[in-house]
């Protein structure tokens, strides 16, 4: 099931994608289920928004692809390397990535994003599916120069607009057969199967939920493959995951 959060005629709604229309839901499906209102909104008339605004946090995993760890100058960590982005960094499809004056080297990092659907603490890996609401696409935008100079990643990863999400949420997704590709102005920068992830989604959820409680609406970014690179004002960044669509944002 493909679910979107969108604006139409001044109202923000959730809807289920049915060919070229959204079937409008009565409320946030994460909390109110999939009851519909009977209204349909043409996809062409809707403005897609970030499919979720995390109520507490975006949990990210660093160096979760071996080739990316190598390009960053080190080995992949034995355990998931966790860091957080604030929910104020989240933007939606077609929103602009604002390049901060504090950085001279902002880079893209296309990633698979997992949306948590229920309160999750000390979840076993074999039970991880039970706490997943769905999957979408993310871009872990990073001020690489600040990441190097700070010695930790909060500022470099946490600027407003540094977490594009979207375009939709897919509740049933076969990540083992899916691929991720990031393009800048049409040029391919990153391309890899999601199966190249070192730590699986289930392992990440188990590891993270042993540290802190995951809440409904929290987002997990699962790491980026090799090929990260700079973006400058005017660039258009597209992150495509097969089965999830294309997340497209411009940089200004």
Image (cartoon, rainbow, N blue to C red):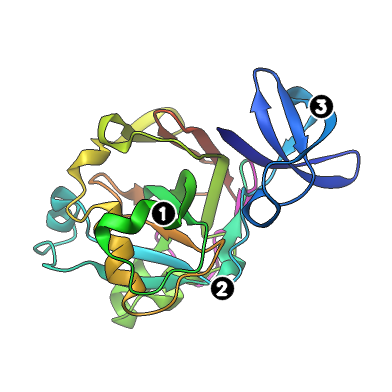
Q: Which mark is residue 106?
A: none
- The residue labelled by disc 3 is 40
Which residue lies at the image location 56% right of the left edge and 61% below the top edge? Answer: 217
Q: Nearer the viewer, mark 2 or mark 3?
A: 3
Q: Distance between the residues labelled 2 and 3?
A: 31 Å
First reached walking from the N terminus: tag 2 or tag 1: 2
CA separation in Å, label 3 and label 1: 30 Å
Circle nearer the N terminus (3, 1) = 3
Viewer-proximal residue, 54 or 24?
Answer: 24
Quadrant of the frame with the N terminus: top right
Q: Earlier in the sequence, mark 2 or mark 3?
A: 3
Q: Which of 150 and 166 is in front in this view?
A: 166
Instruction: Tell me if residue 131 comes above or below residue 179 in the rendering.
Output: below
Assess whether residue 98 is covered by the magenta stretch: yes
Q: Name the residue under label 2.
A: 56
Q: Is 81 situated above or below 137? A: below
Magenta: main secondary structure? loop
Distance from Cα at disc 2 to Cα at disc 1: 20 Å
Closer to us: mark 2 or mark 1?
A: 1
Picture coordinates of residue 85, whole percent (x, y): 47, 69
Q: Name the residue under label 1.
A: 130
> The magenta stretch spans which residues?
94-106
Horizontally, residue 143 falls left or right of residue 65, namely: right
């Amino acid at each position: 099931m493909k679910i979107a959060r969108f604006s139409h005629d001044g109202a923000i709604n959730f809807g289920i994608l049915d060919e070229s229309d959204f079937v409008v839901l009565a409320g946030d499906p994460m909390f109110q289920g999939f009851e519909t209102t009977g209204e349909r909104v043409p996809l062409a008339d809707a403005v897609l928004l970030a499919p979720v605004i995390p109520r507490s946090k975006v949990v990210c995993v660093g160096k979760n692809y071996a080739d990316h760890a190598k390009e960053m100058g080190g080995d992949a960590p034995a355990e998931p390397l966790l860091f957080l982005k604030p929910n104020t960094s989240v933007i939606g499809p077609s929103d602009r990535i604002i390049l901060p004056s504090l950085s001279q080297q902002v880079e893209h990092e296309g990633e698979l994003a997992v949306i948590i659907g229920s309160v999750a603490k000390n979840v076993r890996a074999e039970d991880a599916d039970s706490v997943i609401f769905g999957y979408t696409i993310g871009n872990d935008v990073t001020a690489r120069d600040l990441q190097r100079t700070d010695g930790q990643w909060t500022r470099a990863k946490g600027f407003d607009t540094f977490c594009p999400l979207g375009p939709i949420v897919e509740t049933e997704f076969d990540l083992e057969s899916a691929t991720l590709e990031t393009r800048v102005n049409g040029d391919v920068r990153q391309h890899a199967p999601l199966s190249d992830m070192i730590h699986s989604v289930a392992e990440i959820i188990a590891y993270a939920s042993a540290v802190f409680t995951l809440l409904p609406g929290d987002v997990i970014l699962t790491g980026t493959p090799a090929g990260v690179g700079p973006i400058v004002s005017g660039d258009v960044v597209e992150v495509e995951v097969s089965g999830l669509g294309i997340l497209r944002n411009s940089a200004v």
